[in-house]
Image: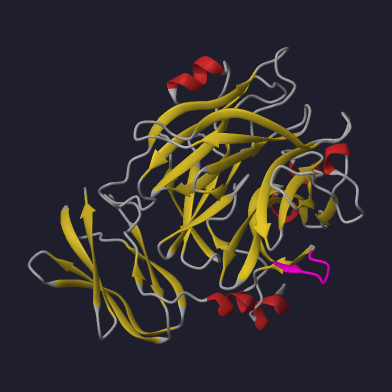
Amino acid sequence: MILLLLTGVVWGQTGDVTHVHDPQIIQHDSTFYLFSTGDGIAIRRSQDLYHWNYIGEVFQELPGWAEESVPGVSNLWAPAILKYNQRYYLYYSVSTFGSNRSCIGVTVNTTLDPFDEKYEWVDHGKVVCSQPGVSNFNTIDPHVITRSYYEVWMSFGSFWSGIKLLRLQAPDDSIGLVSAQDLHAIADRPAEDAIEAPFIYKRGDYYYLFVSFDQCCQGVESTYKIAVGRAAELTGPYYDRDGDPLAEGGGTIIKSGSTRWRGPGHNAVIDYAGSAWLVHHAYDAWNNGVPTLRIARLNWDAAGWPVVEEPITRLMHEEVQPRHWVLEQNMPNPFNTKTSITFTVPEATTIQLNIYDLQGRRLKVLANGIHPTGQHTVVWNPQRTSSGMYLCVLDTGKRKFVRRMILVK
């Protein structure tokens, strides 16, 4: 471990990356937003896919319809995020372990920036549901992909009869994307072998279907692994590298557990800086099996099959440095005793980060000097400062960025 630190290599992401399960990422302006399983769907954000900050939850309480449709539900699972027609659609799973009495719901926002005055999640209820004794599938683990403006498709599935693909109808001004009930079976395994968490990624002439095999959610005992197949058409049929159909138990495994990182799975794929990146969670055997965010570059072999590289390291991170100055809103805000301020430097230069009152008096210098390219976080703990509004100013020498902060004592 000492050697790794001395050489500047840190394996994986930094910041708020623990207790991340079933992650999906989307880019909004110059910021990446990560959504994951949790009581209200946890949200994290980053400027570079490397350093992450927790910024809250989508829901402050479970939607009323969810508790009525799925008695006993305690949290929301496996979110999927889609930008469509200038709005963001967040799909989420409502279920309980071991039952296919499940639903997928959708909530909509016009922005992902929680400090934008237009930021508001508006829930539109359930999209599709499954019921014991009625449905041979389980409506959880959604992923949504567009084939054109007029064609939006959702894949989903966990255990039962495997992975399904459902066409959604386009929305009007008052509802989310709702089910059109055009159902396709695209992947399955024998009853004793689990399959779930689909993600479809288009590259070249093929659609690649990523799925998770075996068992999640058991800490260091988890046996999750990531498998893939591909098809010339979105609706299939999908075949693995050996030509076996995924609908009949096929699937080429591309990521399995290691001594430290157990049960990698429930992946997504995002394009950034000219590369594809595999986003997933794994259970950290060095940290009591806590599910942790992992992001690794995807390469492609001569036959067009994905090959997973090592997770992003600090050295690799230098290849995907941010290109814009960013001063993020302090978190929390309002605050009582201390608050964190994060800013992004696109090129090494001298900066100042100062706190001013509304009369223009400088109260505190939080940062001063040359800062390397990347994301930086400082903490302000104003022990002798009274309640009120204050200004955080990032001065680059050529431009100033300002955020208002509210101290409440």
One can see residue 62 in this view? no
Please give left or right for residue 4 compared with residue 193 in the image.
Answer: left
Q: Nearer the viewer, residue 386 or 214?
A: 214
Check residue 301 for magenta coloring: yes
Q: Going 65% across and 69% down the picture, which residue do you hit?
A: 312
Residue 249 x/y as whole percent: 88, 40
Quadrant of the rendered structure where residue 202 is? bottom right
Check residue 93 for magenta coloring: no
Residue 310 x/y as whole percent: 73, 68
The relative height of residue 348 versus residue 228 in the rendered view (above or below) is: below
Furthest-left residue in this view: 359
Q: Going 50% across and 15% down the picture, which residue do you hit?
A: 68
Count of all numbered marks drawn on residues in the image? 0
Residue 93 x/y as whole percent: 58, 32
User: Which portion, as a residue range, is magenta?
Assistant: 298-304
Furthest-top residue in this view: 133
Please give left or right for residue 302 compared with residue 1 in the image.
Answer: right
Q: Going 63% across and 45% down the picture, which residue do you hit?
A: 22
Q: Nearer the viewer, residue 34 or 196?
A: 196
One can see residue 397 in this view? yes
Q: Going 51% across and 68% down the picture, which residue do you hit?
A: 48
Residue 272 x/y as whole percent: 56, 67
